[in-house]
Image (cartoon, helix red, strand yellow):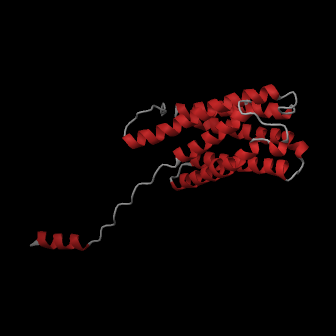
């Protein structure tokens, strides 16, 4: 009798359905960062020829990529990392999304609206310097995540250092051309490192096991 009463009471208690698991936004942020970095680094390395007239240079055609994929897609990934309570992911994706949006708008103002075009290179140099400092902070933080992420941030930090020096020395048309080119090649390596980490996140999650190692720490 007591068992019947217990059973009936248990049946009356509503059971909340299990919440579905959230997808990991990191591959989206990493892929957006990687592709945008790859294209801009190809230009910086001189592999993609720029052209002479600033308003007609090929870099202008890649600015929408920086705004939409490198910019807004990373911002979305950052917001989703907030939901996942991932402080590092939130800070990195939101910040670098804003980086690409800011860099694109700076170039649009100078190239298309003729706002201080002669100061664009110097402005980029100081802009890159600030991001070099910020990247150094995240580089330290990456040592608590995994080796693949450390690799991304080491390469990115060196890339920013080279681009900062190059633009503050006058950019591609001045004495900073070599540094810009080197920064471009390091940026390409950065892009591939970020693509690898994005691929590892997607493939490992899909197969439910570690297919691509990332060198987890801790």
The residue lying at 57 percent from left, 51 percent from top is 77
**Foreground of the two, 131 or 11:** 131
Q: Residue at the location (59% across, 51% down)?
A: 78
Please say whether residue 128 is visible from this viewpoint: yes
> Residue at point 84% right, 48% down?
110
The x, y position of residue 71, in whole percent, is 66, 50
Nearer-the-camera pick, 84 or 199: 199
Q: Is residue 146 above or below residue 101?
A: above
169 relative to 144 in the view: left or right:
right
**Can you tell which quarter of the image residue 181 is in?**
top right
Q: Residue furthest left?
A: 1
Residue 145 in view in this figure: no
So how many labels did they put on this image? 0
Quadrant of the rendered structure where residue 32 is?
top right
Q: Is residue 50 above or below residue 26?
A: above
For the point 54% across and 49% down, the residue is: 86
Residue 94 position within the rendered picture, expressed as x and y whole percent measured from the top left: 63, 50
Q: Quadrant of the N terminus?
A: bottom left
Between 171 and 91, the one lying in front of the other is 171
């Amino acid at each position: 009798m007591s068992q019947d009463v217990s059973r009936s009471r248990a049946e009356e208690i509503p059971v909340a359905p299990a919440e579905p698991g959230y997808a990991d936004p990191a591959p989206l942020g990493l892929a957006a960062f990687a592709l945008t970095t790859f294209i801009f680094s190809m230009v910086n390395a001189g592999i993609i020829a720029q052209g002479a007239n600033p308003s007609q240079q090929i870099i202008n055609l890649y600015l929408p990529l920086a705004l939409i994929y490198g910019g807004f897609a990373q911002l979305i990934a950052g917001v989703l990392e907030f939901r996942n309570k991932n402080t590092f992911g939130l800070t990195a994706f939101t910040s670098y999304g804003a980086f690409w949006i800011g860099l694109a708008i700076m170039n649009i103002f100078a190239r298309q609206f003729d706002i201080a075009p002669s100061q664009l290179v110097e402005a980029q140099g100081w802009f890159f310097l600030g991001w070099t400092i910020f990247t150094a902070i995240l580089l330290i933080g990456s040592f608590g995540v995994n080796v693949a992420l450390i690799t991304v941030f080491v390469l990115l930090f060196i890339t920013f250092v080279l681009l900062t020096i190059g633009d503050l020395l006058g950019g591609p048309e001045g004495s900073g051309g070599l540094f810009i080119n080197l920064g471009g090649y390091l940026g390409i390596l950065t892009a591939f490192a970020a693509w690898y980490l994005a691929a590892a996140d997607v493939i490992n999650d899909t197969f439910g096991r570690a297919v691509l190692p990332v060198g987890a720490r801790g």
